[in-house]
Amino acid sequence: MVGFGQVMALRRSLLPLIEPLSRRRYAWGTPSPDVAWTDDAPAGLGSSRSSGGRWPASYEMRVWVANRDDVAVDVFLFATERQAAAYFAEATSPRCHLAAREVPASSPPRGRNLIWTNPDGPTQQDLFLLRGPRVYRIADVRALRGHPRPASVETGIGVHVANTLGCALKDAGCFVAGPSV
């Protein structure tokens, strides 16, 4: 649990990813770490505050982008780097996700892509990044198209979207930064 200022710092860390896509967010707040498996929407700040005036050390924003993809970005702050690494390892494991496979991300460095069927049914492409005590998740769910491409092409595009967005993070370590989705 953290103070409001730290929650706002977590939020600010995600703005370089989301603002170029859309200023209209349809969901935002503090997600549970279980979001890596459930893809549940985040709790609003009012409902997630503890009686002691503290919040979960996480933040998420979700937007519909111009091409109708559903994009979510999360950040989780852990007390130690070891806790963050344990969460990262578990969240990127395909064994606890439906029809999942995990592959090292081409970029950002040390990122992992997880392609899985989320509980609502669509294929979801996630990028997970471990950066010190923080774990980031960037998720892309491709919109259904009138003239569908092969699933492998849609998955490749979704992975590219997530990885490109991940490069906009301040400490991503990419050679070329910025979302161009």
Image (cartoon, rainbow, N blue to C red):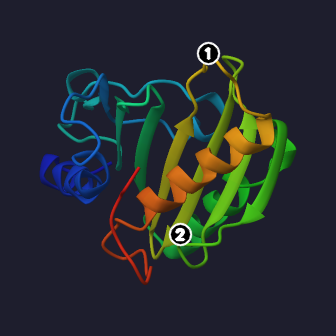
Q: CA distance from mark 2 to mark 1?
A: 36 Å
Q: Position of residue 124 (x, y in %)?
A: 65, 36
The mark found on residue 130 in the picture is 2
Q: Residues within 10 Å of mark 2 (few under 14, many from 20)?
A: many
Q: Is residue 177 above or below residue 181?
A: below
Q: Nearer the viewer, residue 19 or 73?
A: 19
Q: Residues within 10 Å of mark 1 (few under 14, many from 20)?
A: few
Instruction: State the SS at label 1.
Output: loop
Could you tell me which residue is drawn at 30 percent across and 22 percent down? 26
Q: Nearer the viewer, residue 122 or 13?
A: 122
Name the residue beneath numbered marker 1: 146
Could you tell me which residue is drawn at 58 percent across and 31 percent down? 142
Q: Nearer the viewer, residue 153 or 11?
A: 153
Question: Is 113 placed left or right of 10 in the picture?
Answer: right
Q: Is residue 175 above or below residue 17?
A: below
Instruction: State the SS at label 2.
Output: strand
Residue 54: image quadrant is top left
What amino acid does circle 1 point to? Gly
